[in-house]
Amino acid sequence: MTMRSELATEIRRLHAKLEKLGWKEDDCALIAPVTLEINELKREQNAVILAHSYQTPDIMYGVGDFIGDSYGLSVKATDHPAQKIVFCSVYFMGETAKLLNPDKEVLVPRQAGCSLADAINGQQVRELRQQNPQAGIVCYVNTYAEVKAECDACCTSANAVEVVESMPQQEIIFIPDRLMGENLAKISSKKISTWDGTCIVHEGFDINSIRDIRNRFPGAKILAHPECTPGLVAEVDYAGGTEGMLNYVKNSPASTFMLVTECGLTDRFKAEFKDKEIVGTCILCPYMKEIQLDDVLQALKDPRPEQVIEIPADVAQRAKRSLDQMFELEKAGKKLLQEQGRSKLPWTA
């Protein structure tokens, strides 16, 4: 196949994926040479590209092998034969992939931060433990490895209730997301204390915009992430993480939805649910949007030291233990909630 025919084929492939998002063939032609080169290097290097749902469409559908949330993608990589992982995400997500895939090379296209992960460090967790020796400490997975290493267990938005409920302590310090902790406190039997970290995307949504959508689209279903304010979460039809939202939209007979989350996920739903109407506004994550196609290409060609994920052995061991503990507590928590008759949708009372 000639280069011209390869480009034509690539343009058609991209357009089929991105047309629902308003991309024209001319738009696809601009990125096709780069996506072609990235995908060829990926094959040559036995690499897999993970694209978080908040990435731009050209990355998700142009070069991503898997699209999803941070922890789920890291798990997928463990079952993939590739020996190199390129994680198009913020930095802590690359760390999580490295924790679960210690024998694989893990690259991030940019050393992008995160308002949640940057809100707390390992030393601050150690100080919390000294000040509250009776409390268990649970950290949201959106944290750096040094923080995970100091906690009793990690959790995701999908299993936070189960993890917290099955902790042996009655008092729990939930870090770093204050809003998720406040939402958790409303449905937990434990005494929850929080840290003052927030996601700059999800804390930015206005409850009045939710009410406006209700008025303008009476049949619309509204979905939100538990990183939003408790008042907003109380007004939506479903609250949960990315996979929960995907399953809700997929299985719902409704045709109209509002997603109270980052714009990348809104793009993903528009691309993947072509028979559904997505209404309302979204908010961009400036950290996720730092990653560009050219960064992915450069990381594959000649990775810089800051693009290669390295975690000190002692930190990695303790952080991995915190992740492993999550699985045990989640299993126990599900059983406990069933025994108490509290089986429910995530984040609903």
Image: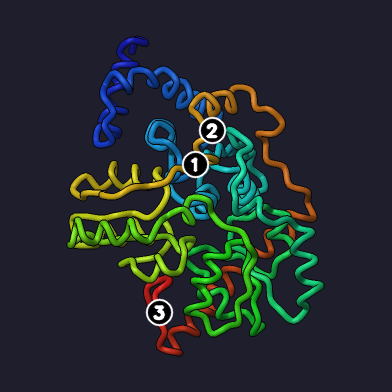
**Front position among marks 1 and 3:** 3
Where is residue 276? Give x, y as percent.
Answer: 21, 50
**Front position among marks 2 and 1:** 1
Q: Is 224 in front, or is 296? A: 224
Q: Is 75 in front, or is 204? A: 204
**Front position among marks 2 and 3:** 3
Q: Which mark is residue 46?
A: 2
Where is residue 63? Give x, y as percent.
Answer: 43, 32
> Which type of secondary structure does the marked residue at label 3 adopt?
loop
Q: Residue at x 33, y 13 (%)?
A: 1
Mark 2 vs 3, N-terminal side: 2
Label 1: which residue? 50
> Which type of secondary structure does the marked residue at label 2 adopt?
loop
Q: Residue at x 53, y 63 (%)?
A: 156
Q: Are marks 1 and 3 in contact (CB under 8 Å)?
A: no
Q: How far is the residue under mark 2 from the one under mark 1?
A: 13 Å
Q: Is residue 93 left or right of residue 217?
A: right
Amino acid, disc 1:
Leu
The answer to whether residue 67 shows anywhere in this view is: yes
Quadrant (top left/top right/bottom left/bottom right) for the C terminus: bottom left
Q: Residue at x 58, y 65 (%)?
A: 178
Label 3: which residue? 349
Amino acid, disc 3:
Ala
Mark 1 vs 3, N-terminal side: 1
